[in-house]
Structures are given as structure tokens and as C-alpha cells.
Image (cartoon, rainbow, N blue to C red):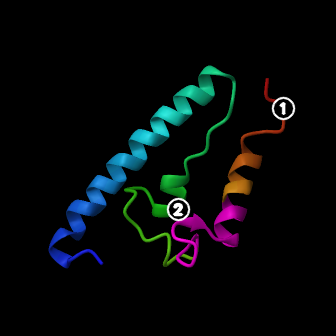
Amino acid sequence: MIPPSLRSVSTRIGVYRARTANRAICRVMAEYGGRCIDVLHAFNGPAGTQDAYRKGLLNLEDCCYPSAKGQQAMAEMLFETGLAPVR
């Protein structure tokens, strides 16, 4: 459990790490003609700080993996990127 005095700091670090990873992944995906979805903002809101667990998009039982609802949301986002074949 993160003490209340450190929650703001840990949230900012988490958002920074997620944004950095997302940028790197999406850059490589684009380089190879792949597609990328923005799960950080879809799950955690525009600032990336909302609680995806509370929304039911992540599963606490298996640590930090998407729940069935989260998997469905990601599938819909991928579907929205288009159905043209990926090279």
C-alpha cells in the first residue's frame, strides 16, 4: 500500500512510465506498418490518472491485467483501427 503522502508522486511516475512506453511501442509499431491503441488514456482518462481498477477495466486478482471488460474495450479499439491487412 502506498502511503497517502506518496500517492501523487507514484501516480505521476506511473503516468510518465506509461506514456513513455506507449510512445516507444507506437513508434516501433508504425515503423513496421503495425497499429497502436492508446490504452493509458482509454483506461485512465485524459490525464492518465483515473482508476482503471475502479472502472472494472483491470483485474486485481491477477495483478494488473485487463479484466474481461478491459479486454473487450481493447478489442473494440483495435477494431476501430481498421480491418485492412497489416503488412
Instruction: Give the residue at mark 2.
Output: 43
Residue 36 picture quarter: top right
Residue 59 picture quarter: bottom right
> Image height check: is 58 above or below 26?
below
> Image height check: is 52 above or below 79?
below
Element carrying mark 2: helix
Residue 75 picture quarter: bottom right
Spot occupied by residue 65 in the image (x, y as percentages of width and height): 58, 65
Q: Residues within 10 Å of mark 1 (few under 14, many from 20)?
A: few
Which sits in the foreground, 34 or 64? 64
Q: Is residue 23 left or right of residue 75?
A: left
| Residue at the (64%, 71%) spot, across then down | 67
| Residue at the (49%, 79%) spot, across then down | 54
Residue 84's disc number: 1
Element carrying mark 1: loop
- Magenta residues, start to end: 57-73
Residue 63's disc number: none
Q: Is residue 3 left or right of residue 32?
A: left
